[in-house]
Amino acid sequence: MSISSRTVSAIVPCRNERRYIEAFCRSVCAQVLPAKWSLQLVIADGLSDDGTREMLKHLSAADPRVQCIDNPKLIVSAGLNRALSRADGEVIVRMDVHTDYATDYIAQCISVLAETGADNVGGAWRAVPDDGAGPMQQAVAAAFQSRWVAGGALSRRLDHDGWVDTVYLGCWPRATFERFGGFDESLARNQDDEHNLRLVRGGGRVWQSSRIRSTYHPRASLSQVFRQYFQYGYWKPFVMKKHRQAASLRHLAPVAFVGALVLLSLVALLGAPAWPLAACLLLYLGAVGAMTGGVLLKAGVGISALSRVPMVIAAYHFGYGLGSLLGFWDVLRGGRANERFAALTR
């Protein structure tokens, strides 16, 4: 791939990020770029009402590389498209306010694009708790990093280099969007997976590189994690409906398990033997125990955090599974997506 332009545009959706936005902008503007490359940072603000907009105006006035535009639809996919429409770069990199980046993050994205000829590149999804985080966020981060909790997703493997079905965030040559289009604004969640699925089905390729390094700060409470994964699960059937396939079989495992529990519970209530339900629950408890052991060996978390890991794993699985069940229900009955599940959970 030949990259003729020397401008790279970072596109960022945000809403009510007053606590984080200034540090984020300063960190992005401090990225060490390759020689002759310049940065454009386009932030699509979802009509923030906590002072974020005022801070962005101040930051853009102080640094012409920072541009702020409105995202009246509020959702991430619309914000990405709005930012993309204002981006000047030949290379487009998506960034997230709640992620920290290696100082060469953008430089490595540009380099890996050139080396691989991929249509999208990115790094692994690495979760780290905040400084001084309590045991719950430590448990959330430790469970998040487990491939087996996530169904074997390559995106959790920090050392993986190779072709994948999706990556965290992403970096594209502009030609990718000209060929495959932007993000689906009918989706409040899973717009990244849908875009990558559309790309791969259309003959494009996605590469994950261990050189592209960033750190994601996960939710800090069990209820936030449950709501987050409930939304991920809810919107996944709408992606499947659009493409008539799942991006990966691992996306079907939580809904199959939760659906089986619901069915077995109903059958037991009608007078059938309850042992199949009990067996299913025991098998799951055993699986959660094994996953927790894997987290302990891999992450080395303390006892207080480790004791919370089983609850976090259950929140991931049941949140995603229940959300998917409701999503499939809305898809099968031909209804529109429920706007209640479009509100962001952070």
Image (tube, grey):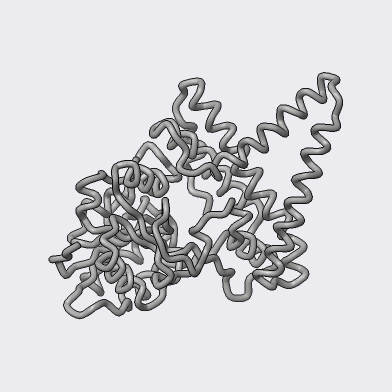
Side of 84 where 297 appears, left or right = right
What residue lies at 56% left-to-right and 61% top-to-bottom? 218
Could one spot residue 57 in this view of the protein? no
Q: Is residue 301 above or below residue 244?
A: below
Side of 174 where 226 appears, left or right = right
What residue lies at 66% left-to-right and 54% top-to-bottom? 222
Could one spot residue 211 in this view of the protein? yes
Side of 85 where 191 appears, left or right = right
* Image location of residue 140, percent across then percent down: 63, 61
* Image location of residue 330, percent across then percent down: 51, 27
Side of 341 where 60 appears, left or right = left
Q: Quadrant of residue 50?
A: bottom left
**The N terminus sits in image quarter:** bottom left
Q: Quadrant of residue 36?
A: bottom left
Q: Is residue 228 above or below residue 334?
A: below
What residue lies at 68% left-to-right and 55% top-to-bottom? 312
* Image location of residue 304, percent across then percent down: 76, 68
* Front residue of this view, candidates 205 and 259: 205
What residue lies at 37% left-to-right and 48% top-to-bottom? 196
* Image location of residue 105, percent across then percent down: 36, 72
